[in-house]
Amino acid sequence: DFRMDEWGVDVALTGSQKALSLPTGLGIVCASPKALEATKTSKSLKVFFDWNDYLKFYKLGTYWPYTPSIQLLYGLRAALDLIFEEGLENVIARHARLGKATRLAVEAWGLKNCTQKEEW
């Protein structure tokens, strides 16, 4: 469960392999209006990634200023469709249930859970 607006998060990053059942390869970035505004005056060197490149192409009706992995984008669309079909609350509950089952299995096998917090 992640609540960007409610928690006051300005930038959130994740990967396609995180809870979306996709292979690695997509970096997913969300930014608040505050973060986007800050980039306009930022003096940080932007060699690999610049919000403004993406926003410029988005406003033109295109999507990426670089070559994306098309098959991963189709997979992302399918994964999001499945989440909406199942319902976000149900997805979160399923992940919690499977996580707990996995931790119990690890314990039953005599192995150690290496996460800092059990819910992770």
Image (cartoon, helix red, strand yellow):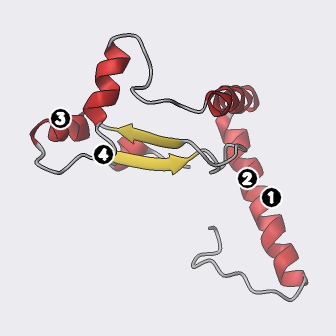
Relative image position of residue 22 (x, y in whole percent):
70, 43
- The mark that comes first in sequence, 2 or 3, is 3
- Lateral position of residue 101 relative to residue 48, left or right: right
Label 2 – label 1 distance at C-alpha: 5 Å
Label 4 – label 3 distance at C-alpha: 11 Å
Amino acid type of the residue tagged 2 in the rendering = His
- Seen at 56% across and 42% down, the residue is 26
Q: Quadrant of residue 119?
A: bottom right
- The mark that comes first in sequence, 1 or 4, is 4
Residue annotated with mark 2 = 95
Dot 1: few (<14), some (14–19), or many (≥20) neighbours within 10 Å?
few
Label 2 element class: helix
Residue annotated with mark 3 = 37
Label 1 – label 4 distance at C-alpha: 30 Å
- Lateral position of residue 15 relative to residue 72, left or right: left
Relative image position of residue 50 (x, y in whole percent):
28, 38
Amino acid type of the residue tagged 4 in the rendering = Asp
Vertical relation: 107 (above or below) 60: below
Label 4 – label 2 distance at C-alpha: 25 Å
- Seen at 37% across and 49% down, the residue is 7
